[in-house]
Image (cartoon, helix red, strand yellow):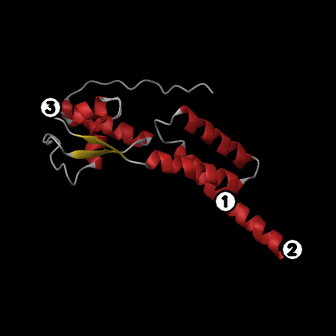
Amino acid sequence: EAQNRAQMALEGQYLVLSARKLHDLYSVTGLNDRQLGELRAAEVALVRGDGAGAYAKLEAIERAVKADRSHKVAPGDSLWSIAGREDGYSNSLLWPLVWDANRESVPDPNRLYAGQVLKIRPNPSIEEVVRAVEYARSHMGAQVKIGAVKEVAP
């Protein structure tokens, strides 16, 4: 009986931790179709009471979305152009995200050096994206309209 109670308590902890992790991952941008499918599978496991199973799936997604990418600066590159590249964020207005990830090596966002290797943090949160666009707009004079968020079909 004591072992059953301990197992139930442990499963309860996994349920709580999984619910928090699921909430956090729903605010991450740029998940691919496979990651979205895994996120939904983890949600189903959570609803069914399989906290440990949900937690394992969510941990794998979290590791994948937190893995940094990099970009070697070429002559003529700018944070604006790097952010706009497909292997960046595919949106030049997100240049502040590149700068934030590299503040130690790039104290001035207008000065990059060919050969520098910059980190590109994948999957910023929605809040980080909004802050980056607002910052870019206020410092670059860009006129941007953010449209309604559309739900991705399953």
Horizontal side of 84 relative to 33 (left or right) equals: left
Q: Which residue is mark 2?
A: 1
Depth-wise, is mark 2 or mark 3 nearer the camera?
A: 3
Q: Which residue is mark 3?
A: 76
Which mark is on residue 24?
none
Q: How many marks?
A: 3
Q: Secondary structure at mark 3?
A: loop
Q: Gap in Å between the C-alphas at discs 2 and 3?
A: 69 Å
Q: Gap in Å between the C-alphas at discs 2 and 1?
A: 20 Å
Examine the rendered structure and indicate whether residue 150 appears above or below residue 9: above
Label 1 neighbourhood size at 10 Å, few (<14), some (14-19), many (20+)? many
Horizontal side of 103 relative to 20 (left or right) equals: left
Q: Which residue is mark 1?
A: 14
What's under tag 1, amino acid-wise? Tyr
What's under tag 2, amino acid-wise? Glu
Label 3 neighbourhood size at 10 Å, few (<14), some (14-19), many (20+)? few
- Mark nearer the N terminus (2 vs 1): 2
Q: Quadrant of the N terminus?
A: bottom right
Q: Secondary structure at mark 2?
A: loop
Tags 1 and 3 touching, CB below 8 Å: no
- Mark nearer the N terminus (1 vs 3): 1
Question: What x and y, as percent, mark residue 124?
Answer: 41, 42
